Image (cartoon, grey):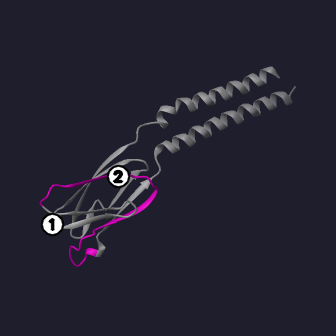
Amino acid sequence: MARGLRAFVLATLLAGTALLALGPVLSAARPSVTIEITASQYEFSPGRISVPRGAEVTLVLRAVDVSHGFYLDGYGIDVQLNPGEEPTVVTFTATTLGKFAYRCSVTCGPYHPYMKGELIVEGPLGNTVLWGGLLAAGLVTVGAALRVHRQEASR
C-alpha cells in the first residue's frame, strides 16, 4: 500500500511541477500587433486581418486616392482618412472573440457600400497551452491512480 501511495504522490507532484513550469508561458506579456491598412476605391488592403484576443492592436491607416473613412464595428472606432496626409494611427485592445466588420464611413464613390473588411479576434495561444498542460497533468494523475489500483488488486 505504501509503495502505491508513494507512486501516486510522485505522479501528482510531477503533474504539479509541469503546470508550474508552464507559468512563464501563460503569464507572458500581452502581445502587440501593428497592421498597415490602405484605403483606395473601393477596397481596404488587407481586406481581412486576424489578431489574438487581448492583443494591443495598432492600425496605421492611409487613403491613397480620395477621402475615405474607417469604421470598426464593436470598438467604436471611426476616423477620416485623407490622401496626401500622414497616416492615421489608432490603437485599441482586442478584448472580444469574434468577427468584426470594418467599412468605409465616408462616401467615396458609387461602389462605396462594397468597401468592407473583416477583423477576426482569435483565442490566444496561452489558452491552448493551459488546456494542454491541464490535460497532460490529468492523464498523468489518472495513469498513476490506475497503476496503484492494479497493484493493490494484484496483492
For the residue marked with disc 2, what is the amino acid?
Answer: Phe
Toward which corner of the image does residue 152 lie, by quadrant? Answer: top right
Residue at the bottom extreme, as displayed: 110
Residue at 63% across, 30% down: 15
Structural crowding at the residue carrying mark 2, measured as other residues with C-alpha within 10 Å and reported as few (<14), some (14–19) or many (≥20): some
Magenta residues (range): 84-112
Structural crowding at the residue carrying mark 1, measured as other residues with C-alpha within 10 Å and reported as few (<14), some (14–19) or many (≥20): few
Q: Secondary structure at mark 1?
A: loop
Q: Is residue 144 left or right of residue 26?
A: right
Q: Which mark is residue 92?
A: 2
Q: Which mark is residue 65?
A: 1
Is residue 125 highlighted in magenta? Answer: no
Find residue 133 and report its horizontal and vertical position in percent. 57, 37
Reply above or below: 76 against 133: below
For the residue marked with disc 1, what is the amino acid?
Answer: Asp
Residue at 71% across, 36% down: 142
Depth check, front residue: 47 or 71: 71
- Tell me the quadrant of the picture where the C terminus can be found: top right
